[in-house]
Amino acid sequence: MSFKKTLLKNVAVFGSYDYITLVLEFISTMILSRLLLPEEYGFVAIIVIFSGFIEIFSNAGLSQAIIRTDYGAKFFRLIFSFSVWISFALFMVMALLAYPISLFYENKDLFLASILIAIQFITNSFTIVPSAILLKKLRFNEVGKFKLFSHLIYLVLMIFMAYLGYSYWSLIVPGILRPIFFYFFLERKIKFGVWIYGWKHTKLSFKYITNILKSYSLFNVINYWARNVDNFLIGKVYGEFELGIYSRAYRFLSLGIRLINSVFGNVLFPSLKKEIEEGKDYKEGFLEIVGIIHFLGLLFATALVVFPEFLVKILWGENWLKVADFMPYFGAIIPLQTSSIASMDLYVLNKKEKALISIGIPSSLILVVAIVFGAFFSSIHIARFYALMFVVIQLPFLLIFGHNKILGFEQKKIILFWGPKIVLTFAILLSLWFFPQLFTNIIVIVYIGYSIIEQKANLVTGINFLLKKIRG
């Protein structure tokens, strides 16, 4: 079976669980948005600005190190111990930040909530190695199933606590417990156990993963703040309500990335590793997969760009209607965001982690400048300048210096593959800002038509596959 067919088969298995989870999550947000206010979501979003930053160190390339390595069980135990010790250190950092956060935002309630959210670092650390071991063995079905079960319990707990009137605590406490449920299911399957070694062994494990850990950590730090300066500024300048609205809209961008990249990424990385081990040229097949990712992202984005108000009313009600102003701008860049993120693992597979830093710093600064500039006007201008800067400057920069110069993709192929997509996305953003909705809808239709032509062969294959399944 070809690389593409094998990968898509595994994506279908792994993704089915993630998509069921997504449906359940949408249903839960419809309920929660009628039990909680934007201010309560904004309260938690303020803490997540900082906890999310610290969390990027908890799994900074550890899963990739396990999948990429040829070492065995002893190495996995060392990494497990290392991840647990790291999580305790991160917990302490967040606990120390709790009081300054409450002072900066002038809200004493943030103190205890920040400490409780920090517990997630510890509970998350127990799941990193067991899930990576299953992914390394291409056992996607089991990982997807366990994630679905643990997420379902998490959603039920949130709704139950919100119904009982626990306010923002209903968004915090279930998040601490979810990794425990996930670990319970993983442990029942692989019986990995709990391995916590002393300083000597911890230092030894760090020696083996130092390059990937440093590169991933530094890149993630740069990338995180580039993508969260907007939340920081809105929370401070425009308040919790505005941040609650903005973060809910931005969540669709994160949701698109999770829906597509988390599924494809978890399958793509070990699959590409296998192709490289067998000495095959993966680049052509990789671009085909990225094309499929882009097409899926476009389908997801279309509803956000064309029907934002309708979606908001159906999902969350009148209290959240302002979210519809932001949704089209984030929706428009989802296809390009998901497509470009899919390339990140290629740097690790080719052992060019350090190159992530060389392209990460300038590309992230581009977004920061756009966000700060937009903050001088309004929160909606932050979304506008963020989207425009990504499409016009950041993505072309990543393609020229990343794909072409570092990863070795041919310049002609890059232009033919990415050029029309960038032009059409740019046209959508301009029409959203300056022209009536009808003009935007026409561009979206053209974009979909172009993507259907580009993906004609894959669509025919997919339809035939579904028909065979139905007839069978």
Image: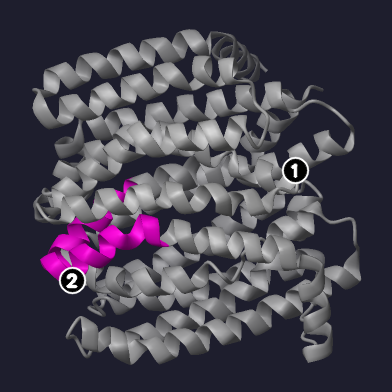
Q: Is residue 350 above or below residue 154?
A: above
On screen, residue 168 versus residue 462, left or right, reads left
Q: Residue at x 62, y 64 (%)?
A: 60
Q: Is residue 32 above or below residue 440?
A: below
Q: Position of residue 267 (x, y in %)?
A: 68, 42
Q: Residue at x 37, y 16 (%)?
A: 448
The numbered disc on residue 350 is 1
Secondary element at tag 2? helix
Q: Position of residue 303 (x, y in %)?
A: 28, 31
* Foreground label between 1 and 2: 1
- Tag 1 and tag 2, C-beta contact below 8 Å: no
For the residue pair 178 and 242, the one nearer the viewer reads as 242
The Cα–Cα distance between marks 1 and 2, rounded to whole angstroms, is 41 Å
The span picked out in magenta is 225-252
Magenta segment: does it hold 238? yes
- Quarter of the picture containing the C terminus is top right
On screen, residue 59 versus residue 454, left or right, reads right
Q: Position of residue 440 (x, y in %)?
A: 19, 21
Whether residue 205 can be seen here:
yes
Residue at numbered disc 2:
236
Q: Position of residue 217 (x, y in %)?
A: 58, 65
- By secondary structure, the bulk of the magenta-drawn segment is best described as helix
**Which residue type does callout 1 highlight?**
Asn
Magenta segment: does it hold 15? no
Whether residue 17 can be seen here:
no
Q: Is residue 30 above or below residue 438?
A: below
The numbered disc on residue 265 is none
